[in-house]
Every structure is written in structure tokens, then in C-alpha cells.
Amino acid sequence: MDFSDMSEIKRIGFVGFKTMSELFADSSVIPKIKGIYVVLCVDGKKPEFLKVGTGGHYRGKNPNISILGLENEWVEGAYAVYIGKAGGGTSDSTLNSRLNQYFSFGQGKNVPHWGGRLIWQLKNSRDLFVCWKPLPYDEPREIERDLIRDFKVQYNEKRPFANLRD
């Protein structure tokens, strides 16, 4: 998959393509089924990084990293800035419940969504797009892992910006 090509992302079955702001206001369009999701920065510009983002301090941990750390994680030219999963394995979460948890974390709430936390140190985080792919028959963690592996092949072993592990 080409992570810098919207038509390719759509071609492999991702839908939604709503901004964070739109989904903060109404997340009912997100399906209540397991799957994977991708956060996209499609304007082609390097974002402005915030020293202190809007992410929650889950279990008292500070979700922020240094500006230098953010700059080191940024992947020039990639639209995909975070790849996440919902459900599968022993989890009964759905795309809807997991993304709402993610949005709550991004609005400063003390909820468990540590993965993808660097997104909330982007000044334009509310303008980022979210798309998702329901996976009623596949294991979301396997597909997430495959996508991250494909990303690393395309971008010289770098993960998507906010994916801090494979």
C-alpha cells in the first residue's frame, strides 16, 4: 500500500475520511465492529508541534515527548500518521468504542489510549482525518502489524509518526 496516496488507501477498503473535529461532534458514523483505523495528515506540510499537547495523563503518566523527539518521529511525505486497531483477540472493543476512547484521551481525559498519543502534540490535530476499515472476519492486530510493516518498507524502516511500536 502507498501511504502517500489517498486513492490507494480508499482502494484497499478504508472508508470514513472524517476530520477529528467532525468525529468529536458526531461519531455515530463509525461502525460498531472490530477493525483498523488510520489517522491521516493530508495537507503535505510538516505540522507545528506543541510542547504540551492535549492528551490525557493516564495513570498519572505525562503523554508528551520533546519537540526534538516529535521531529525525529515525523515521516516526511506520508499521509498516515497513526495506524490503530479495535477489537480482536480478547478485546471486544469496536471501531466506534476505541476511536471514542482515543478522542477522549485527546481531549485530556484520563482514559486508556496511550498508543497514538503523539497525535495530540500536533497543533492541527483536530484537522487530521480518520478513516477505518471494518474487519468482521480478520484479526485486527495482524492487519495492523502488516500495515506498519508495509509502511516501514516504504519509509526506510520508520513507523508512522505516532506508532511507537510495531
Image (cartoon, rainbow, N blue to C red):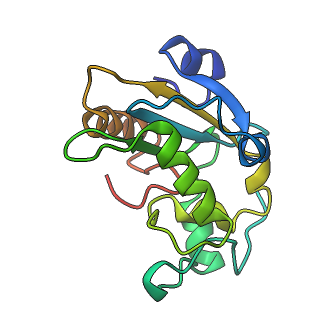
Residue 146 drawn at (x, y percent): 30, 33
In depth, the one of 134 and 119 nearer the eye is 134
From what the image shows, is residue 62 above or below residue 120?
A: below
What residue is rendered at 38% in x and 33% in y? 34
From what the image shows, is residue 22 above or below residue 103?
A: above
Q: Residue furthest left?
A: 90
Q: Is residue 46 visible?
A: no
From what the image shows, is residue 166 above or below residue 39?
A: below
Quadrant housing residue 77: top right
> Which quadrant holds the N terminus?
top left
Q: Is residue 118 visible?
A: yes
What residue is rendered at 52% in x and 57% in y? 162
Residue 158 drawn at (x, y percent): 43, 51
Quadrant housing residue 15: top right
What residue is rendered at 76% in x and 57% in y? 47
In depth, the one of 146 and 114 nearer the eye is 114
Give the number of callouts.
0
In depth, the one of 134 and 45 nearer the eye is 134
> Would residue 56 appear left or right of 92 to someone viewing this image?
right
> Would residue 157 appear left or right of 70 to someone viewing this image?
left
From what the image shows, is residue 150 above or below residue 98?
A: above
> Would residue 59 appear left or right of 142 to someone viewing this image?
right
> Would residue 42 appear left or right of 89 to someone viewing this image?
right
